[in-house]
Amino acid sequence: MTELQLPAPAKLNRMLHITGRRADGYHELQTLFQFLEHGDELCLRLRKDGEIRLTPGLPGVSDGDNLIVRAARLLQAESGCPLGADIHLTKRLPMGGGLGGGSSDAATTLLGLDRLWQLGLTHDRLAALGLRLGADVPVFVRGHAAWAEGVGERLTPVTLDTPWFLVVHPGIEVATAAVFGAAQLTRNTAPITMARALQGGAPSWHNDCEPTVRSLYPQVAEALDWLGSRAPAMLTGTGACIFARLNTEAAARRLLADLPERYTAFTARGLNLSPLHAALGD
Ligand SMILES: C[C@](O)(CO)[C@H](O)COP(=O)(O)OP(=O)(O)OC[C@H]1O[C@@H](n2ccc(N)nc2=O)[C@H](O)[C@@H]1O
Ligand SMILES: Nc1ncnc2c1ncn2[C@@H]1O[C@H](COP(=O)(O)OP(=O)(O)OP(=O)(O)O)[C@@H](O)[C@H]1O
């Protein structure tokens, strides 16, 4: 095998609590991750000369900073593999959108190159490598919807409801660090058990970042008001994207048809198993 075409799905944070702040400034979270049937796509082609080449590059991100290139180089360094790859990226997920696009690209690169280079590393090992690239990478490596604690790396697989979602991008980028650095952010939600979070179900879920993101980014507040008046709506991660939960694809499409021109949006079903793992036959 010399070529692999693989998906890099989006994630949603179906709920997100901030329960504390560590000495290094990172925040302790409790969150439920679920995948979407929508995302980026990577084509990985084997190179024998050890070079890692990415096309096309992303605006505003040097290749050396791109999580795809960083993931490929990390895997080479850790495994001692002398092989390389040409990687073609079809970017569909908005950057800084809270959909985990960069993290998902990194996870697809790790699993795809592990397969292409025939390294046979375990998911445990690849998830630990992924964590060095970003807090959201391990869940994409594991490939199962999950209850996450710590900074998102302590994962327990869960099976959530799989409604249709309308995901709306308000047209601005949110800086994750600015939200986590805001004085007004509440960081003291009492930790709950996974059983309690699951018991309440979707109607009881909320995102602790939402009040802060609303006040720092009025465009997100406006989009939440528009969507929230039509269906139960929430922020994913630190935004900027928001999502509404619908019972049917038709209902999601009807809402999409009403979307004001200033926003972009897509509809997708929630998935408990990542399409990446389905494509790899894991
Ligand atoms: C909010 C989530 O999207 C939930 O899934 C993630 O925790 C964010 O993960 P991410 O985008 O991979 O974030 P990173 O690139 O690791 O962190 C960006 C910045 O956000 C802050 N940060 C991030 C995650 C976290 N648990 N606590 C933080 O305080 C840190 O200042 C960090 O420098
Ligand atoms: N392959 C990549 N795709 C997207 N962003 C990348 C990539 N590589 C590096 N980045 C950088 O990472 C930043 C965050 O991108 P990403 O799309 O993962 O944001 P996000 O959806 O908000 O993620 P999260 O939900 O994990 O906070 C971008 O603004 C960009 O500078």
Image (cartoon, grey):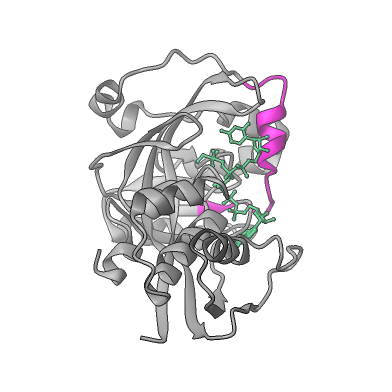
Would residue 123 appear left or right of 173 to someone viewing this image? left
User: Picture coordinates of residue 30 (x, y %)?
Assistant: 43, 28
Would residue 275 appear left or right of 176 to someone viewing this image? left
Would residue 215 appear left or right of 269 to someone viewing this image? right
Would residue 35 appear left or right of 97 to someone viewing this image? left
Occupied quadrant, residue 193: top left
The answer to whether 115 is drawn above or below residue 240 in the figure is: below
The answer to whether 164 is drawn above or below residue 146 in the figure is: below
Occupied quadrant, residue 273: bottom left
The answer to whether 42 is drawn above or below residue 254 in the figure is: below
Q: Quadrant of ligand 1?
A: top right
Quarter of the N terminus within the rendering: bottom left
For the record, the magenta segment spans 168-185
User: Picture coordinates of residue 79 (x, y %)?
Assistant: 48, 63
Q: Depth check: give the residue in front, 279 or 130.
A: 130
- Residue at 51%, 33% in the rendered image: 151
- Residue at 69%, 69% in the rendered image: 58
Determine if residue 9 is in view.
Answer: yes
Is 180 within the magenta?
yes
User: Picture coordinates of residue 225 (x, y %)?
Assistant: 55, 38
- Residue at 38%, 62% in the rendered image: 253
User: Picture coordinates of residue 282 (x, y %)?
Assistant: 25, 63
- Residue at 42%, 70% in the rendered image: 112
Q: Depth check: give the residue in front, 48 or 130.
A: 48
The answer to whether 237 is drawn above or below residue 183 in the figure is: below
